[in-house]
Amino acid sequence: MLFQQSLIADELNIYSARQESLIKPLLDQFTESTDIKVNLVTGKGDALLTRLQSEAMNSPADILLTVDAGRLYRAQQAGVLQTIDSSALNSLVPSHLRSSDDKWIGLSVRARVIVYAKDRVNSNQLSTYEALADPKWKNKICVRSSNNIYNQSMVAGMIASQGMEKTEIWLKGLVGNFARTPAGGDRDQIKAVAAGQCDIAVVNSYYLGRMLTSEDDNQRDAANKVALFWPNQGDRGTHINISGAAITKSAKNPISAKRLLAFLAKDSSQRWYAEKNNEFPVRDNVSISKVLASWGPFTADTLNVTELGRNNSSAIMAMDRAGWK
């Protein structure tokens, strides 16, 4: 979809790496309540960043919506974002879920968790991400490939908290415990555990939530054969990441853009995210869906998510040295 350059304050153009079904209903609500028209272009995160870079100041986009702090940091480093100066947004989004220099904000929280086979693993056998390097898990772990940004951010978070030396040792042990060459997405890892190809997997929690509520019998059956475990509850907490947004440097309507971001961060929008996307709100005082609540409360890592982007290149190199395909 193409749209014309918007030069009026009652219209916004958005580049979104989120599927239309996962964001458009909220955008429609925003338009209904403000009379600000929203034009939406969807695509892959990396492709949208390339487009922003190519268009430079001629870009019609006012807002970039994407997933993972690593991608938002890449956009920041590419120089296509502007500073978001908004006390209202700062009050709605906790500081560790925002860029450390106010270039982007988190709009929902996603946790990277351990799922395990109910019939083969007892939860008391599990504890931390670090413990997944224990030889007892030899040939028992499934995870997607190292080129996946979610895994890169998890390793980047490990580097930030544990340092490179400990992270490298952990990575070698983890890779040595893989049950198979990494392949497929997070749903495929869950299906592999259910099918007995491995005993545990590392996935984003919302994939399990979507499978549990899927209309596909096979997805529901697979999801019901596994359980979720929150790692690192005795120390730094479970690794989290965000879906988030930024105002582009080329934005013609930054004031309206801030209004939209504030709308997406308010309680009713956050509840919608939890219900429809199976992601967690950015604030603890917002209610969540029955599926999310069924997993119980958890302690999340409060590392500023900027570090996930800042350590991305180091994480990729460390994963490569460890042989993570």
Image: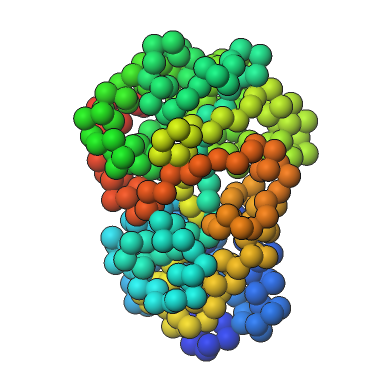
Residue most extreme to the bottom: 8
Which of 60/76 is in front? 76
Q: Position of residue 272 (x, y in %)?
A: 68, 59
**Residue 109 position (above or below residue 229):** below
Q: Position of residue 55 (x, y in %)?
A: 36, 70
Q: Residue at x 33, y 19 (%)?
A: 173
**Residue 285 position (above or below residue 189):** below
In the image, taking residue 320 as reference, residue 96 lies left or right, namely: right
Which of 16/268 is in front? 268
The answer to whether residue 184 shows anywhere in this view is no
Q: Residue at x 28, y 30 (%)?
A: 167
**Residue 75 position (above or below residue 255):** above
Q: Position of residue 220 (x, y in %)?
A: 73, 31
**Residue 21 position (above or below residue 139):** below
Q: Quadrant of residue 282?
A: bottom right
Q: Residue at x 46, y 48 (%)?
A: 241
Q: Position of residue 249 (x, y in %)?
A: 36, 74
Assign the N terminus to one quadrant of the image: bottom right
Assign the C terminus to one quadrant of the image: top left
The answer to whether residue 138 shows anywhere in this view is yes
